[in-house]
Image (spheres, rainbow, N blue to C red):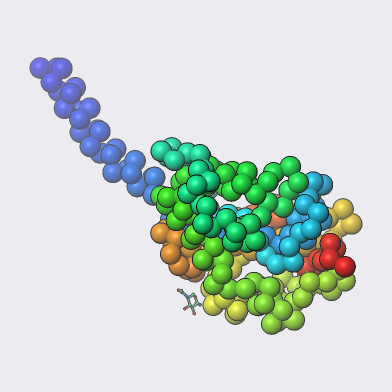
Amino acid sequence: MAMKRTMKVVFSLALLLLPLASVAEEFDFMYLAQQWPDSYCSTHKYCIVKPPSHFTIHGLWPSYNKRPGSHYCKNYEAYLDPKHIENLETLLNKKWPSLTLNQNNLEFWSHEWRRHGTCSKLGQHRYFKAALKLAKLHSLSKILAGAGIVPSNQNTYTFREISDALAWGTGLTTYFKCSKNKAGDTLLSEVFQCVDRYGEKLINCTAPFKKKAHSCVNVNKIKLPTWFHH
Ligand SMILES: *[C@@H]1O[C@H](CO)[C@@H](O)[C@H](O)[C@H]1NC(C)=O
């Protein structure tokens, strides 16, 4: 009798917890992160010799409104199979290159897939294709240039100028983060846009941006450097 009751309690508990578990698994949106290569190279020792002079993709990151994103999810395709993205490789080399000398492009993509892609519910081909397609929707360089924000080692721009240009140019909430080089310059290093859970379209972000360590909020002298292009 006691046994039967225990079983019943365990069973009801399991039923109660089941929906909770599946809700917790479901992320809310994804960040599309794009980086400015010259800023990366100004702050990292092992940078590639010729960084591209356009924004490049960093990754597509499943995220939650109320907590940090999950990493390295259990996935039957835990490791990136280059065959799955063979027909995207030319584009990926151009738009999603590794900026670090000790990691080649395929290693960079594998890392992003393992850390973030495995949590995305997308297959490998769809994951990389989605990022390429979404990054193509807006040319961040053109949007910034349209507002007079051009790569320069001298010019500086205010936080407000950059955020207004991105919001106006994309029609969407756009976040960005900065880094500091040794000379103490604040550099625009990365731009984030929000993407729906299916990797299909850009959306307005619903979560506040939590990159306090690299915040550019209220900084009035931000550079978009071009140290490596002469
Ligand atoms: C995002 O928000 C802006 C400003 O509120 C609005 O004009 C725009 O239509 C929204 N876009 C989407 C895709 O929801």
In this view of the protein, which residue sits in the foreground, 103 or 31? 103
Q: Position of residue 196 (x, y in %)?
A: 44, 62
Residue under the point 41% across and 38% down: 76
**Which of these two is toward me, 67 or 57?**
57
Can you say which quadrant of the picture contains the C terminus?
bottom right
In the figure, 124 relative to 225: above or below?
A: above
Identify the residue shown where x is 74% and y is 42%: 102
Q: Position of residue 79 (x, y in %)?
A: 50, 39
Looking at the picture, does residue 110 appear above or below residue 93?
above
Q: Residue at x 68, y 73 (%)?
A: 141
Name the residue nearer the viewer: 118 or 69.
118
- The residue closer to the viewer here, 123 or 7, is 123
Q: Position of residue 16 (x, y in %)?
A: 25, 39
Count of marks placed on residues: 0
Query: Is 19 on the left-hand or right-hand side of 198?
Result: left
Query: Would residue 177 appear left or right of 174 to someone viewing this image?
Result: right
Rendered location of residue 176, percent (x, y): 65, 63
Residue 33 visible? The answer is no
Identify which residue is drawn at 47% across, 39% down: 78
Query: The N terminus lies in which quarter of the figure?
Result: top left
Confirm whether residue 182 shows in the render.
yes
Quadrant hosting residue 177? bottom right
Whether residue 105 sits left or right of residue 201 in the image: it is right
